[in-house]
Amino acid sequence: MSAMDIHQILQYLPHRYPILLVDRVVEVVPGERITALKNVTVNEPFFPGHYPHHPVMPGVLIVEAMAQAAAILSFKTTGNMPDDNSVYYFVGIDGARFKKPVMPGDQLILEIALKLNKRGMWKYSGVAKVDGQVVAEAELICTMRQVE
């Protein structure tokens, strides 16, 4: 169980601004779960268009944040580091539900649990919370592939 700062996160995720959606890992238990966070600020590049008079974080980006946390959990579970020869793909989303809007100033807590790792496919359950209340949940399916 160890926390990760942004410098360590950047070693595990290829994402960079504006699509990097994990600011800190609070706890990771390889093979089991990860808790990460995303600080949502008014300066996010999507807010001017979603929506100008009532900024709301797009649900698809909340799910992407969960997938990024899941990717870190996968790498921590296998003991591997990402490299230029492989890509971690998001291949499915099941049961996505959005309970409350996420607004500027919110801190999104991402709780991801590994449910299955079989033949290169990883399945997770993900919950996103703000102030202890569930704002989104989904089951995520991901895989790692070699780049040609």
Image: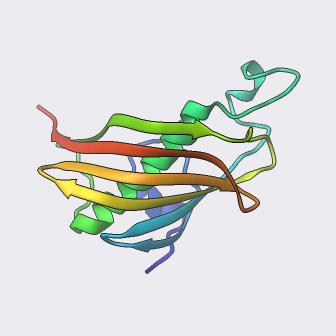
Please report the residue visible at 33 percent of the width from the left and 72 percent of the height from the top.
Answer: 30
The outermost residue toward the bottom is 1
Above or below: residue 58 compared with residue 144: above
Display coloring? rainbow
The N terminus - image quarter: bottom left
Q: In front: 143, or 84?
A: 143
Which quarter of the picture shows residue 5? bottom right
Q: In this rendering, would 40 be left or right of 66?
A: right
Q: In front: 27, or 43?
A: 27
The outermost residue toward the right is 53
Q: Position of residue 39 (x, y in %)?
A: 69, 52
Q: Position of residue 99 (x, y in %)?
A: 68, 41
Please report the residue visible at 17 percent of the width from the left and 40 percent of the height from the top.
Answer: 145
Q: Position of residue 142 (x, y in %)?
A: 30, 43
Q: Position of residue 137 (x, y in %)?
A: 55, 46
Q: How many numbered circles does the render carry?
A: 0
Above or below: residue 68 compared with residue 96: below
The outermost residue toward the front is 95
Above or below: residue 16 compared with residue 117: above
The C terminus - image quarter: top left
Please report the residue visible at 76 percent of the width from the left and 44 percent of the height from the top.
Answer: 41
Q: In this rendering, would 25 be left or right of 83?
A: right
Asked if residue 135 shows in the view, the reply is: yes
Asked if residue 20 shows in the view, the reply is: no
Q: In front: 18, or 111?
A: 111
Q: In this rendering, would 123 be left or right of 26?
A: left
Which quarter of the picture shows residue 76? bottom left
